[in-house]
Amino acid sequence: MPVNSRNILKKITDANLVGRGGASYPVAQKWAAVKSALATRKIAYIVVNGAEGEPGVKKDGYLIKNFPQEVINGVYLAEEFLNPAKVHKIYFFLNREYFRAYGPGLKKVLTLPKYKKLGEKMEFIVKPEILTYISGEESALLNLIEGRKVEPRLKPPYPTEHGLHGHPTLINNTETFYNVSLVARGKFKNERWYTINGSVKHRGVYSLPADLSIAEVLHRTNNYPSYSFFVQVGGEAAGEVLNSKQLDQPVSGAGSIMVYDERSTKKDRLFKYWLNFYHEQSCGNCTACREGTYRLFELFNHPEPDHKLFNELLDNLADSSFCALGSDAPKPFKSYLKNILKK
């Protein structure tokens, strides 16, 4: 059956497609919500999130470089589904590196006859050099496009109903649009893209079944270490740290696996890297995160750090932060202490 605006949602639903920005939210559910909101609204927006603020994640850049037409085709299908007459504008969000390197390739695809009208609606937004992480959160990204302070919005309402300039807005990750294109052509095989970094022989981006365990991904890519190691999964900042006996679970989040050589990795150096990231990337919107990340940074660098207070601050961040930056901050520290130091 040819793909059209009426059956693409069914194809996405049947494929059990989930978003690949990190949250794994059902794609069909999000698309249907925007379509439903448009029943009584005149304007909608589409936002393509391809800026990759989580350290260690490289899959979106790989896709934009190697499969720009598939990505653009996914956006085209989204516009067709929502109704081109109602989609007022499309924004493509990229970091500076990706925009310089791969922007020309994307723009070239947009000159093809099929995508010419799409290209007339598309505007590229380049990620600011500060607050690079939080600007990738969907509601913070909307604020960025609107010229407001880059910080998360209170939800509900959700962007699907009240997004950019108050209108229904579809926001999906680059890999998600790529997968939609595969679904439409009957080529989707329930695979996802994994980024593998760290102390391995073959760093890179790999397309493999989405239900593989961490260990299976490392084995299939010939990256399973022969030495004592541990991993951080989902991202190099917010990812969970696991020892080599805990790798029978699927890869979470944005699909990255960072491999550490346990013999040469120093805890203090690793903690300092994470603390620097969270301290620098906090948008300052909520007191818990703004003060908490600063105090953690300050405590860690004290000649005689108060370990009990450090852990209490981690718990407070998890319970009181407004967005995922603060609430996820304790994850790498606590999982390292539990799974690596106390294994």
Image: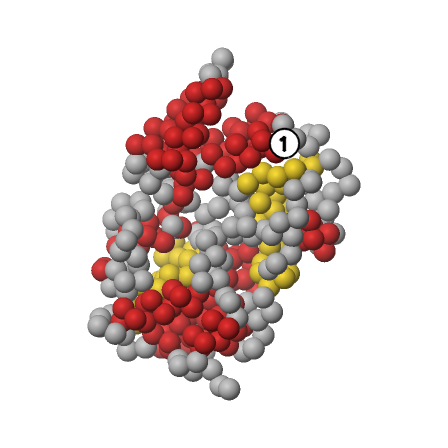
Q: Position of residue 48 (x, y in %)?
A: 40, 62
Task: Give amino acid for label 1.
Answer: Ile
The secondary element bearing badge 1 is classed as: helix
Q: Quadrant of residue 199?
A: top right
Looking at the image, which is closer to me, 156 or 196?
156
Q: Which residue is mark 1?
A: 340
Report the residue at 73% width, 52% height from top: 219
Is residue 152 at all visible to an observer of this figure? yes
Q: Position of residue 5 (x, y in %)?
A: 39, 80
User: Which residue is situated farthest in the bottom direction here?
Assistant: 1
Q: Quadrant of residue 117?
A: bottom left
> In the rendered view, how is the structure colored?
secondary structure
Drawn side of residue 147 relative to residue 64, left or right: left
Drawn side of residue 74 relative to residue 35, left or right: right
Location of residue 291 with respect to 157 vertically, above or below: above
Mark 1 crowdedness (10 Å alpha carbons): few <14, some 14-19, many ≥20: some
Q: Quadrant of residue 285?
A: top left
Report the residue at 46% width, 53% height from top: 23
Q: Position of residue 10 (x, y in %)?
A: 45, 76
User: Which residue is situated farthest in the top direction here?
Assistant: 304
Looking at the image, which is closer to me, 331 or 120?
331
Report the residue at 60% width, 69% height from top: 189
Drawn side of residue 234 relative to residue 318, left or right: right
